[in-house]
Image (tube, helix red, strand yellow):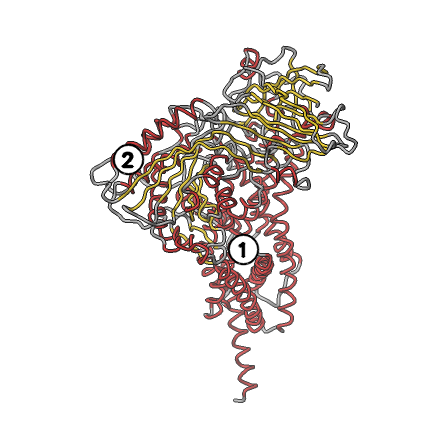
Amino acid sequence: MGDKDKLISDAESLQDTAERHAKLAQKLNRPWYFGAGFLLFWAMLFVSIVLPLFYRLPTPLTEHESNQGVFIAERAHKTLAGLASIGTKVVGSQHNEVETVQFLLREVELIKQQVLLEYYDIEIDVQVASGSYVHWTMLNLYQGVQNIVIKLSPKNSASETYLLVNSHFDSKPTSPSVGDAGHMVTTILEVLRVISTSKQPFQHPIVFLLNGAEENPLQASHAFITQHKWAKYCKVVINLDSAGTGGREILFQSGPNNSWLVEYYKVSALHPFGTTMGEEIFQTGLLPSDTDFGIFNTYGNLVGFDIAQCINGFVYHTKYDELDVIPQGALQNTGDNILNLVRALANAPELLDVEAFASGHAIFFDFLGLFFISYSSSNGEYLNYGVAAAAIILVFVSLWRIAAVSNVATEDVQRWGVLLLITQVIAFVLGLALPIVVAYALDKYGLALSYYSRPILVVGLYVCPSLVGLSLPSTIYYTLFKNPKVFFAHYIQLALHGHAIVLAALGIALTAYGLRSTYVITWTLIFYVIPLAINLLTTLHDRGYAWTTILKLFQIVPFLYNGYLFYTFVVVLTPMMGRYGTATNPDLIVSALTALGTILSMGFLILLVNMFRRPSVVFGILLGVSALTIYGALYTDIGFPYRPKTNVERVNYLQVHRTFYEYDGTVSRDDSGYMFQFQDRRGPTALQNSNVDLTGLVSLEADCEKYMMCGVPLYDHRWVKSRLTTMWLPREQPIETPSRPTLKLLSKTVLPDGLTVRFEFELTGPDHTSVFLQPYADVTLSRWSFLQSYLENTTTYPPPYHIYFSYGIITTPLNFFFELKKSNGDFNVELIEVGVAAHFLESVGDEGSVEFANSFPSYAAVVQWPASYQRYIY
């Protein structure tokens, strides 16, 4: 038999085999309810595996004789209870500056008495510091903030390379700060206790920093890294903070540019939890949070880890951040990880010369909290490109095999593949767009955050529309364009190949862009490439639906991981969306991330619904679930986002008494009212059916155009940034503040050049006071006693200038000066507006204000205090 005859015979044999497989596949086509059961299987897999592992916590250890040299959650919890009993710890308050400092020093002294002095030296220092730096758009000026600094060194150590471990003990107003960051402070104390009483050696001295002004923001960390005697020796930092409470802590920043650090986390963390994707999302600035980690890196060039509590962020910065929401298992989880990480880094040779090991960024992620994967970003690029290339090559090999089995021209199969690739591009766009459309539409009806207290609604609002968008284009194509030349099992394969090509192209593009989070796409694609290779290497590829068995088995891994990853984002971001402000629809972020998670988790699997009869029934079920959920959000209380204590609406406002003084000293305006900065998208509409009387509430946008800083005592940089959304509720009865700040003009001196005048002032006020300065159009503010670089960078920091001033243990008045230049030298006219905003954060206000605060519903977490504003013209 010749070669030609043999090829014809082989082709005929393949054709006969394919026909038999096609008949078998037709028999295997299951009824539609098997399709519904198929989706239900994956949903149950998520509920039974992802959720338990996500919320899993270790068993807390007790103070038992056998538990030596390990972290004891029971002991840490007792310390945390003592810290919680102090209450709120606002910078400048008696609670923060005296009671908390004394409590922590007592705890440190108890530890000192247990230190194995034959092995270690321990030094304790209370730093009191003053300074300033630019934070966002304001000059952050602090006076007398306190740090408790403990250095633990190996006996007679001469090492000049230190490891820094940091957290903060101060709080926001009304918050007991048990989670943020009492949890981390007590973790540090217990880690110090364990290390200093164990004989396990370490090489590098460890500096434990308990800083007393992080919420202010970030003042105490700046004070330490720029002024403390030990700061210059610190090379690596472990920063511990919180945006939630009562769960596992997440590693969300590492490095930068030191991938070796992640290797230490990988081998040290007993309960790993972290992702590069979280790091990149945080560093976009989209999230309403900041940490000391950036200060240590910017001002001290330190590298290291940023680790934070992130679950149950609903109580973050509220009065509900209490001891009862923190199980001892959460303390054990954090303690196990941090103790091991501190011990490992304190022995790391890389600390001797950190710069020599700077080797680029790392890609890292945990798999269901079971183990940790990391590799360098350069290796990640190779992996991304390699997997994308392998996917494309194997897809083309598969097309050739389909053509051979079906006895049709390869060009025909490629043409059908291109058509189904187009459907998958459309499907990808729809899978991403439909949930965003739902989010946009609900927001138009004033129903943002409908999922806030019931995250399960995310399934109907966003997951189901995404699944419909992913599968509908290919199903419509199969219905309209039946192809008798190729077996339907292969026809479905072409759609899956199209989705793989979309992911490969996206992976290549995002890798070229430099996005390290592309690893999520790559690992999703890996678990399509491997089963495709196995199916091609065997006869499973050509045997009806046999190839789907291998595919479904391998898809378990990306389904579980992507479901876990994006569930993490939903859990972490949902509470944050409740403080995202009124100007932006936060549901667009949640819907987009949910859609992306659905695409990566179910992008291949949802296409397999076409294996079952009448897949349109499955789509109908998905649409029905979505419709019922949207109906519930629109017309029932299910979609109301807030619940008492557990899912509160954050209501921030000030009791304001403002006075406008003109150039001649007369008063042009003297009024009082409540100044609201609503934290969530719904704003005051969520309070409409409650007992609180908001009649007369108006926007201050018109005043913002008329007056410097809207003519109100904006608190900090966030309030300044969102000032156009500030609202004002007038009050006839004048607000009575605890005191009135005094701005005393000490001198006004024309300098020898005749074109410059110097003003000197003394400001006496509460522990949180802002000064706003706005020179007139023909006047230049050329010099002052504050940070000169802030004044000179008018492009980045144009007037009006914002000086945010707070003090801790040192309460002396603020003395300052500024110099004004004017070309004609006429200084007997209006030159500059000066605004003084005084904030009394520890006061509940006068009787009328207390009554007003008590009228808010139980689902509102009210944060409010008296504030005065004086506008002067000089």
Say which of 489 and 524 sits in front: 524
**In this rendering, position of residue 188 left or right of residue 299:** left
243 over 563 or under it: above or below: above
**In this rendering, position of residue 546 left or right of residue 103:** right
Residue bearing mark 1: 518
Quarter of the figure with residue 592: top right
Select label 2 or label 1 by which is in front: 2
Q: What amino acid is labelled 1 in the image? A: Thr
Mark 2, secondary structure of its residue? helix
Q: Which residue reaches farthest left?
A: 65
Q: Residue at x 70, y 23 (%)?
A: 874
Residue 112: assigned label: 2
Q: Which residue reaches farthest right?
A: 824
109 over 522 or under it: above or below: above
Q: What amino acid is labelled 2 in the image? A: Lys
Say which of 376 and 217 sits in front: 217
Q: Tell me, yes or no, whether the two marked residues, 2 and 1, touch with CB atoms within 8 Å.
A: no
Say which of 829 and 255 sits in front: 829
Quarter of the figure with residue 76: top left
Residue 593 x %, y %: 56, 45
Would residue 634 be seen by someone viewing this image from the given angle? no
**In this rendering, position of residue 568 left or right of residue 414:** left
Q: Residue at x 67, y 25 (%)?
A: 834
How many neighbours does mark 2 have within 10 angstroms: few (below 14), some (14-19), or many (20 or more)? many
If you read the primary sequence from the N terminus, does the residue marked by circle 2 or circle 1 appear first? 2
Residue 54 x %, y %: 42, 43
Say which of 319 and 740 sits in front: 740
How many neighbours does mark 1 have within 10 angstroms: few (below 14), some (14-19), or many (20 or more)? many
Q: Which residue reaches farthest bottom?
A: 1
C-alpha distance separating marks 2 and 1: 48 Å
Residue 419: assigned label: none
Would residue 654 be seen by someone viewing this image from the given angle? yes
